[in-house]
């Protein structure tokens, strides 16, 4: 049940990002649900590989390059899915940051941490 609630909260967070960031557009709740699932899969499968390959840059930037990796993945999902559009890489970086903050806040409010 927590998995489905988290998925729905991530989709709502994605709709919030589309409202707050001008260069990000989500056409419907169904697209937001699909995009939230694809973003989750990309973060689970692709992000660890990218982090390993970019470890020297990440160390030199004291971990700040992780924001760029998150933005690249967010932007890539926006280019992959129709109905979810991320126009620029900078919008992807800002969108990924806002998405994680909104998702974290919604999860802290709604999902019980027992």
Image (cartoon, helix red, strand yellow):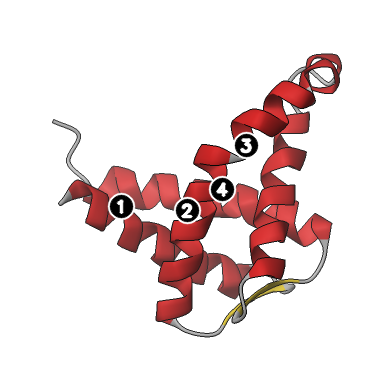
Residue 81 location (% of width, % of height): 61, 72
Q: In this view of the protein, which residue sits in the foreground, 102 or 55?
A: 55
Q: Name the residue under label 2.
A: 102
Q: Point out the tag, 2 or 1, that comes first from the N-terminus.
A: 1
Image depth: mark 2 or mark 4 in front:
4
Q: What residue is at 15 percent from the left and 52 percent from the top?
A: 1
Of pointers 3 and 4, the one earlier in the residue sequence: 4
Residue with the mark numbered 1: 6
Compute the Cα span from label 2 to label 3: 20 Å
Q: Is residue 23 above or below residue 5?
A: below
The answer to whether mark 2 and mark 3 are in CB contact below 8 A is no
Please name which of the two marks, 2 or 1, marks the residue nearer to the observer.
1
Name the residue carrying label 3: 47
> Callout 1: 10 Å neighbours few (<14), some, many (20+)?
some
Mark 1 residue element: helix
Q: Which of marks 2 and 3 is in front?
A: 3
Disc 2 from disc 4: Cα separation: 19 Å
**Which one is closest to the eye, mark 3 or mark 1?**
3
Rendered view: 113 above or below 77? above
Pointer 4 with pointer 1, Cβ within 8 A:
no
Q: Residue at x 79, y 25 (%)?
A: 54
Answer with mark 2 or mark 3, whichever residue precedes in sequence.
3
Q: In which quarter of the image is the C terminus?
A: top left
Label 4 sits on residue: 42
Circle 3 SS class:
helix
Q: Give the residue at x 43% y 51%.
A: 103
* Front tag of 4 and 1: 4
Contact, mark 3 vs mark 4 (Cβ under 8 Å)? yes
Label 4: element kind: helix
Left or right of 30 on screen, residue 92: right
């Amino acid at each position: 049940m927590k998995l489905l609630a988290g998925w729905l909260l991530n989709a709502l967070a994605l709709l919030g990002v589309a409202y707050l960031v001008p260069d990000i557009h989500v056409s419907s709740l169904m697209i937001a649900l699909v995009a939230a699932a694809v973003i989750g899969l990309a973060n689970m499968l692709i992000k660890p590989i990218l982090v390993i390959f970019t470890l020297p840059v990440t160390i030199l930037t004291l971990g700040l390059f992780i924001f760029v990796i998150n933005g690249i993945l967010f932007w890539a999902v926006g280019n992959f899915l129709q109905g979810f559009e991320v126009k620029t890489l900078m919008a992807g970086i800002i969108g990924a940051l806002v998405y994680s903050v909104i998702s974290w806040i919604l999860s802290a409010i709604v999902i019980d941490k027992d």
